[in-house]
Image (tube, grey):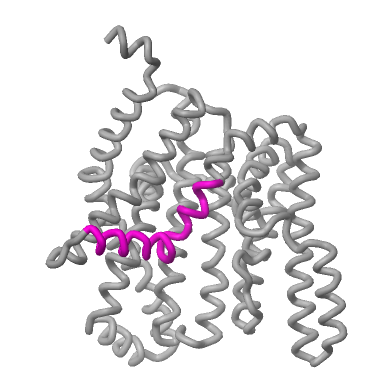
């Protein structure tokens, strides 16, 4: 192993830890609301408000790793993304269809299942792909900005997101105390002063790059403050959700929390050895966990009698113990999905990717070299 690889390993483990923990939060978002003591309660709403930071974290991490100098040409970059992001959808949609519908297989049934997943459980990937296509161009554009302008851009984004949080709360409070005039006034200002740089998760994707630039130039004190602000925003999101404040998607406070958590995890040191290897393993399997956890595990569990028995069993506990036990359910679901990914990734996906990469490499090879061969 090269010296350069050795120096990067602890940092990579940090991001793998963040990726794995965020995937656990994804599982929790899909699990906790249907559990006793969480379903239809303020506690359940607060838990979801806490866990929803997972969405902007994944877009931010994607931007952090994608908006970089190209290794090779543009076609090679697109081929790598097709292999690592798009191909798993096709491979595991086939696996899931065969496993879940083995007694009545048909092309129409498969296409219907695949479309259903893309429009629901797997929405993240169709949302991310356009950003990945733009990433090389974004890098060329953003690299033209010096550090001072990068800081200005980050401040602008965070200011607009902060205004989005404030305006949202003002409108909610005005409606709560029956002051429609104040609510209308704030809404008018929000139309004139945007509450986010652009709609959707595209700005969040770009903020992954902004974090990378800022992490090299900001003083340690500023980065510590940003990390604390991220944790505070995360707790505030949970508190407001518990109070019943409506949540947009994406919610501005989630993005602020995710940006701060990037600085927080920059400071995390994962111990070398077995701990680091386990974290990296879980992080690398997080995408497959995302593809598996709902359709293969949660949907099957909720459709059977076992889920009813589980919820009745949890309902029998006193609240503190029932809540603590309920929190373990997403952990178990995550572990089951990780186990499935740990088996299928090397056996199925890795071989499909090798074949795909070989075919693409032959197609991308310059014509004169193919002629010589």
- Bounds of the magenta segment: 107-130
* Count of labels in the image: 0
Foreground residue among 239 and 228: 239
Rendered view: 132 above or below 117 = above
Residue 146 rendering spot, x and y as whole percentages: 77, 32
* Residue drawn at (31%, 63%) of the image: 113
Q: Residue furthest top?
A: 372
Most frequent secondary structure within the magenta stretch: helix
Residue 199 placement (x, y as % from top left): 67, 59
Against 232, is 187 above or below? below
Choose between 181 and 63: the one closer to the eye: 181
| Residue 36 in the image, given as x and y percentages of width and height | 40, 86
Q: Nearer the viewer, residue 57 or 329?
A: 57
Q: Quadrant of residue 254?
A: bottom right
Q: Quadrant of the N terminus?
A: top left
Residue 359 appears left or right of 31:
left
The answer to whether residue 76 is left or right of residue 178 is left
* Residue 31 in picture, x, y percent from top left: 40, 74
Q: Residue at x 19, y 59 (%)?
A: 98
Q: Quadrant of the C terminus?
A: top left
Quadrant of the image occupied by residue 357: top left
27 is within the stretch colored magenta: no
Q: Which residue is rendered at x = 26% and y = 50% of the image? A: 342
Q: Identify whether 44 is placed above or below 152.
A: below
Identity of the residue furthest to the front in this view: 108
Q: Residue at x 62, y 74 (%)?
A: 247
Q: Judge left or right: residue 65 versus residue 236.
A: left
């Amino acid at each position: 192993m090269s010296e350069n690889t050795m120096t990067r390993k602890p940092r990579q483990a940090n991001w793998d830890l963040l990726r794995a923990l965020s995937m656990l939060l994804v599982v929790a978002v899909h699990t906790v609301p249907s559990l006793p003591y969480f379903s239809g309660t303020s506690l359940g709403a607060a838990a979801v408000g806490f866990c929803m930071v997972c969405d902007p974290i994944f877009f931010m991490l994607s931007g952090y790793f994608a908006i970089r100098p190209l290794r090779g040409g543009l076609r090679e970059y697109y081929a790598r993304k097709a292999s690592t992001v798009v191909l798993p959808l096709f491979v595991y949609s086939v696996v899931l269809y065969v496993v879940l519908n083995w007694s009545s297989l048909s092309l129409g049934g498969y296409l219907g299942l695949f479309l259903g997943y893309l429009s629901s459980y797997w929405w993240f990937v169709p949302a991310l792909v356009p950003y990945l296509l733009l990433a090389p161009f974004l890098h060329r554009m953003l690299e033209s900005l010096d550090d001072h302008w990068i800081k200005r851009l980050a401040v602008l984004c965070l200011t607009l997101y902060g205004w989005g949080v404030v305006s949202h709360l003002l409108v909610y409070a005005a409606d709560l105390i029956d002051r429609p005039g104040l609510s209308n006034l704030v809404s008018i200002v929000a139309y004139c002063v945007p509450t986010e740089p652009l709609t959707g998760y595209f700005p969040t994707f770009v903020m992954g790059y902004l974090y990378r630039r800022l992490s090299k130039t900001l003083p340690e004190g500023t980065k510590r403050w940003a990390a604390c602000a991220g944790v505070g925003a995360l707790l505030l999101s949970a508190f407001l959700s518990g109070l019943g404040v409506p949540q947009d998607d994406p919610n501005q406070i989630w993005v602020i929390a995710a940006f701060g958590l990037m600085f927080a995890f920059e400071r995390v040191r994962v111990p070398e050895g077995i701990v680091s290897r386990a974290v990296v393993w879980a992080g690398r399997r997080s995408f497959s966990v995302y593809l598996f956890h709902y359709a293969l595990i949660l949907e099957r569990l909720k459709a059977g009698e076992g889920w009813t028995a589980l919820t009745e069993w949890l309902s029998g506990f006193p609240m503190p113990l029932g809540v603590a036990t309920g929190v373990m359910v997403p952990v178990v679901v995550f572990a089951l999905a990780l186990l499935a990914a740990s088996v299928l990734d090397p056996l199925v996906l890795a071989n499909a990717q090798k074949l795909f990469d070989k075919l693409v490499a032959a197609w991308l090879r310059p014509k004169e070299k193919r002629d010589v061969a």
